[in-house]
Image: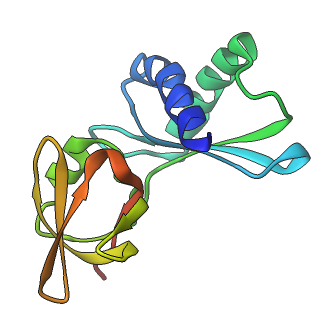
Amino acid sequence: MASLTNTRLHGLLEPGAAALGFEVVAVELAGSGGSTVLRVYIDGPDGVTIDDCARVSHQLSAILDVEDPVPDRYTLEVSSPGLDRPLSKRRHFEQVVGSEVKVKTHNYVAGRRRFTGVLQQVTDDVVVVEVDGEPYDLPFDDIEKARLVPEY
């Protein structure tokens, strides 16, 4: 249910961020009751500043006030995706082929759900992650969560 809610929220908020020149990279709704947090990660062609986050937050707050998609009280957080940026769209994966990623799937693939390795390939249906020399075909629609592993 959370992923459906996140998908719906993403679709609702994307046009508001786009109107200011930003992309909604990912949306996370976490917690419950009075401790619910709606996190929106944004990115722009020149990165993201604190002022950008404040402008987008103001824009998204207005949309959320009108649409009221979250039944409980919540705190809205708008931020940059950071070095360990979430990967939620095919093109996000395509941009980091050859990099190390962490992927969690909804279902078991070859007896596991968590994969940390080098992203080898992206097709319409799967991402291929090599873990310890072994390639794993992970169905794109089965990916619960994915992040880039930052290089220091």
Q: Which residue occupies the foreground of this view, 70 or 115? A: 115
Residue 128 located left or right of residue 116: left
In the image, 152 versus 89, the foreground residue is 89
Residue sitting at the far bottom: 132
Which quadrant is the C terminus positioned in? bottom left
Q: Report the front residue among 12 and 111.
A: 111
Q: Is residue 70 above or below residue 65?
A: below
The number of discs equals 0
Give percent across and percent down for residue 99.
18, 70
Can residue 103 be seen by looking at this rendering? Answer: no
In the shown orientation, is residue 151 left or right of residue 51?
left
Residue drawn at (68%, 20%) of the image: 64
Q: Is 138 situated left or right of 23 in this image? A: left
Residue 77 placement, left or right of 91: right
Q: Position of residue 132 (x, y in %)?
A: 19, 89
| Residue positioned most to the top | 66
Q: Quadrant of residue 134?
A: bottom left
Q: Which residue occupies 74% across, 18% down?
A: 68
x 72%, y 10%: residue: 66
Image vertical order of residue 127 relative to residue 29, above or below:
below
Q: Residue at the location (69% across, 13% down)?
A: 67
Looking at the picture, tell me which residue is in the foreground, 78 or 34.
Answer: 34
The image quadrant of residue 111 is bottom left
Report the quarter where the N terminus lies.
top right
Is residue 52 in view from this perspective? Answer: yes
| Residue 43, image x, y percentages | 38, 41
